[in-house]
Each structure stands twice: as structure tokens, then as C-alpha cells.
Amino acid sequence: MQMRFSTCRLLACMAVLVLAGLPKVAAADEWDFCIKLSDDLAVAECSRAIDSQQYTGRNLARLHTRRGGAYQALGDAKRAEADYNESMRIDPTYPAAYSNRGNIWFQKGEFDRAIADYNQAIKVDPKYAVAYANRGSALGSKGELDRAIADFDQAIQLDPKDAAAYYGRGSAWSAGGKYDRAIAEYNRAIEIDPKYMPAYFNRGSAWANKGEFDRAIADFDEAIRLDPKTTKAYYFRGMAWERKRSLQAALADFKMYAQLAPSDPDGLTAVNRVSKVLRTR
């Protein structure tokens, strides 16, 4: 699980991203054939299991939830929602279906609807850590940072090895301007999962907001290494280079960002700004 507190001005708001990338999708955790296959294959295998009519109750609800998660990952929110609804009908006490449906609303920016589903997941299972973390993401996206932090606290208490929950709590601290606390949270997320790209990205943003541009650049380097499609990392790294007056490096990153995200005018604006300065040298 990339975040949505606010849009970013040049460098002042670099740390303000999403709370937890995307909220975490819970998988039906009983059958390897539903979990370990790719999402497109999981759709086929779960459909075969559902159509076999061999499963009932919680087992059938889990199959629908796993298939819903696969549909969601493949971009088919309508079918995903239908599977989550069917899972709830079959077993109204299965929390993953509510939490996963909440993620659909989250991705649409309908945070109140998302929170209502996360609330229901927690109601049926007060120890369901994923729902607390997801609700924290939605609350943070609404700017309710104290409540978001409280939910991430609870998620971490229930699952101390959840890197995404530390990342989310760090993003909430960062959104409130508490960059040292945010960095500590991102550090913890990276300790748990050294390949957790969003933590490097947001830690780089926090370093940049503290004026520590070399450390920011190093983190953006790692974010790009882990996921070259992290387009915004090129833009933010370019801003860090620009603040260091390393304008050729900044221009290269801004050009890359403008190429990767042509619909965002910020890329071309940055290219033109730096190019103008270089021409006057």
C-alpha cells in the first residue's frame, strides 16, 4: 500500500503525502490457491471454488472477499464491491469484507463512507488491526490527525510488525509538521520491511522539510530504485537538487518527471524555471 492530506507547494509541503499509500486489503487467509496466485489467476480459481458449491458460511465469505480483493487490484471496483457485499450477506461477522469495501470508498475519496465500513469491521472484530490502520488513513486524509494517530497506535499495539501502520503514523506526524517524530516512524517501518518504498519516499520528504537535502536525495534514490514508477520521487528529488543549486541534476529529474507525468503541469513549469536560470549563467 501511495497519500491525500493536501497538495504540495514547491518544497514547503513535500512531506504531505498519503497516510498509507493505499489502505491494506485483507486477503481470505485460508486457501493457498486464493492467496499465492496472481490476482487474475486468483479470480479464476476463487470463481471455480465458489461455483463448486462445496463451501458455505465463513469459508464461502472468505472466497468472495479474496476474489473481491483480486478484482479491486485489477481495477474492477464494481465487481469487487459485489463480492464484498455477497461476503457480508453470507457471513455478516467477517471483518475483512467491510474493511476491503471501505478501501473502495477510500480510493474514491469518499472518506466518511470508508470510515463507516472500517467502523463496522472493528465492531465485528475489535482486534482487527487492519481496520484500525485503514481508518487511520481515512481520518488522516480528512485532516483529523489526532484521531488518525490514535488509530495507528491501536493498529501497532495489535500488530507491532505492521510496517504500514508505522508509515501511516509517520505521515500523520509529518502532516502536523513534526518531522523528527515522522522520521522515527519511517525508520521503524523500514526496519520491519527494508523494501517498503513509501517509507523511503516520505522520509525523504521529511528530511527535505528539515533542510537536509542530501539525506532527502538518498531516500528518493532508494524509492526510485525500489519502484522506478514512483514518478513523484523524480519531482521531489529535483526540488531537493534545486535547493542545493545543483541545477543540472534538478533539470534532469524535472525532465524525467515531465515525461512520466505529462498531465501534471508542475513538471514542465519546473523544467522551464530551471532552464531559464541555467541560460542566464
Image: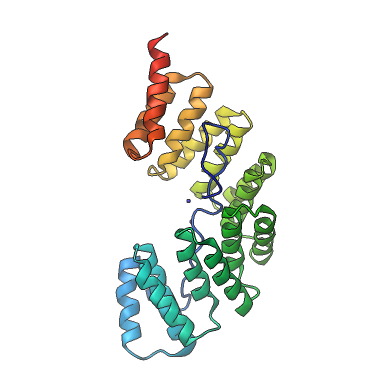
| Rendered residue at 55%/43% (across/down) | 202
Residue 29 in view in this figure: yes
> Quadrant location of residue 183?
top right
Image height check: is 213 above or below 16?
Answer: above
Percent from the top left, x then y, of residue 152?
65, 59
Q: Is residue 114 left or right of residue 66?
A: right
Check the image and name the residue furthest to the top.
Answer: 281
Image height check: is 114 above or below 196?
Answer: below
| Front in this rendered view, residue 275 or 63 | 275
Percent from the top left, x then y, of residue 20?
54, 54
Numbered circles on residues, count: 0
Percent from the top left, x then y, of residue 154?
68, 64
The colour scheme is rainbow
| Front in this rendered view, residue 14 or 142 | 142
| Rendered residue at 58%/68% (across/down) | 131
| Rendered residue at 63%/77% (across/down) | 123
Q: Is residue 77 left or right of residue 99?
A: left
Image height check: is 239 above or below 1?
Answer: above
> Quadrant location of residue 72?
bottom left
Residue 36 in view in this figure: no
Question: For the C terminus, which image quadrant?
Answer: top left
Percent from the top left, x then y, of residue 149?
67, 56
